[in-house]
Amino acid sequence: EVQLVESGGDLVQPGGSLRLSCAASAFTFSTYWMSWVRQAPGKGLEWVANIKEDGSDKYYVDSVKGRFTISRDNAKNSLYLQMSSLRAEDTAVYYCARNLKTTVTTFDFDLWGQGTLVTVSS
Amino acid sequence: EIVLTQSPATLSLSPGERATLSCRASQSVSSYLGWYQQKPGQAPRLLIYDASNRATGIPARFSGSGSGTDFTLTISSLEPEDFAVYYCQQRSSWPITFGQGTRLEIK
């Protein structure tokens, strides 16, 4: 089954760090841009970061630049999000998402994981 | 940053009725606009990309239109499973942004 499975969400204190993982299966992971999108409790969706197929290009929303790092391991079919200097406003469900590929890669998201909850609180 | 404003915030309709959801961009996004459906406790699902293209497996009752700054998602005849929150999303420029959502509820 084509799927994405996130893990690593937890309760962490402000200023702390956390690493999220996303395991991809049943598709050629190395040929897709991948993304993280988050959703604060009861709120809307916020794109967080994107990474190119080979990891050579990365983009971030301003609010996480310098604190979060997106990476991937194509040999392990895995996507990661290293989060540091965490703030209360980073509290959210974090979704791993695959970028839609038609004749070219787009920045729409056609496959999503179930999400992993990150809670930043003392 | 491009701001997407969705209206109405809540839409109350009955099964079988036609739903029309709006998304307005603060500046032109050309046709680089998508629509997602999200049900409680679930991840979003891509419905429409590039303003009017249905994603794989999406029923024909869902259609999208518009370009530039004004976009519409239409559900021609509501099924019980269509009651959910709908988000628009632009990919015209960084950062990628989403609208605040329209809640489609059963009347």
Image (tube, coloured by chain):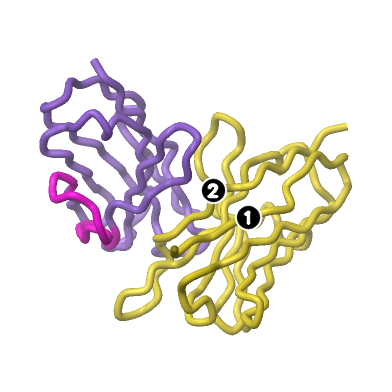
Chain letter of the residue beneath label 2 in the structure image: A
Kindly indicate the quadrant of the structure image that contains residue B93. bottom left
Chain B on-screen colour: purple
Q: Which amino acid does label 1 sit on?
A: Glu
Q: Nearer the viewer, residue B93 or B73?
A: B73
Residue drawn 27% across and 24% down? B11
Circle 2 SS class: loop
Q: Mark 1 points at which residue?
A: A6
Chain letter of the residue beneath label 1 in the structure image: A
Circle 1 SS class: strand
Is residue B95 covered in magenta? no
- The local crowd at label 2, few if under 14, some if 14 to 19, many if 20 or more residues have their Cα within 10 Å, is some
Q: Name the residue under label 2.
A: A114
Q: In this view, does A33 lie to the left or right of A105?
A: right
Do residues under tags 1 and 2 come within 8 Å of each other at their CB atoms? yes
Q: Looking at the picture, how far across and down is residue B3, in whole percent? A: 44, 47
